[in-house]
Amino acid sequence: MRRLMIDIETIDSAPKAAVIAIGACVFTADGVQTGDFSVVVNAELAKAYGTVGEQTMAWWATQDAGVRERMFSGLLSPYDAAKAFCNYVRESHVDEVWANSPTFDCVILRHLFAQLGMRAPWHFRDERCVRTVYAVGRELGVDFNAGYSEQGAHDAVVDARNQARAVGIILKAFADFEEKAWMYEGLES
């Protein structure tokens, strides 16, 4: 199964936030990545297609200067960035679309696509939630911190790759639990 991990950077936290960066990678159940995608949008042009939040802008001012500079250095128009991303998703032939969480990344991207007269390049039923998998992983005692091996938090593509590795660690642990479950069948009596 081919999975797509998406991460976006925005200048608001509302469902209609302006998107300034899109990062993604295709990954398998073990977290192995087969390709990634990264675009940084011209922040001034992005404002025409989404909202800007004072709190989010203040938050950006406190982030790593190098990452902040990269995320605000985009030259692409929102249309060109969204079109390139849609092409990447379609060419990747993914079965699932993952985000942390879909109620943020996917909702905001759908708003951007609608503003640009585009359709999302995936079906809403294919969306999966990183936060839910993390929560279940924690409940089962799975340590997935090793997935966050790449530095550069809040760089969209770095976050996508880190999340894909972490989800891969958890999915592998789920498979190991399932494989061992037969040993415990019938022991509850």
Image: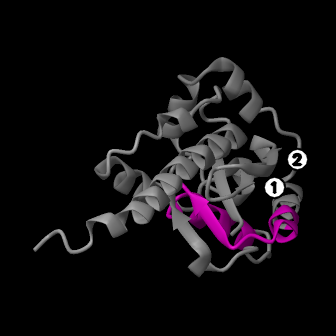
Q: Where residue 16 appears, x then y in whole percent?
A: 58, 61
Q: Where residue 50 appears, x then y in whole percent?
A: 65, 57
- Residue type at mark 2 is Leu
Residue shown at 51% from the left, 57% from the top: 171
Residue shown at 61% from the left, 35% from the top: 154
Q: Is residue 147 above or below residue 135?
A: above
Residue 10 shows up from this direction: no
Q: Which residue is mark 2?
A: 76
Q: Which residue is mark 1?
A: 78
Q: Callout 2: helix, strand or loop?
A: loop
Q: Where residue 151 appears, x then y in whole percent?
A: 64, 26
- Residue type at mark 1 is Pro
Q: Is residue 122 magenta?
A: no
How many numbered marks have been drawn onto this rendered protein structure? Answer: 2
- The mark found on residue 88 in the picture is none
User: With 12 as the anchor, is 111 left or right in this view?
Assistant: right
Q: Nearer the viewer, residue 151 or 3?
A: 3
Q: Is residue 97 above or below residue 55?
A: below
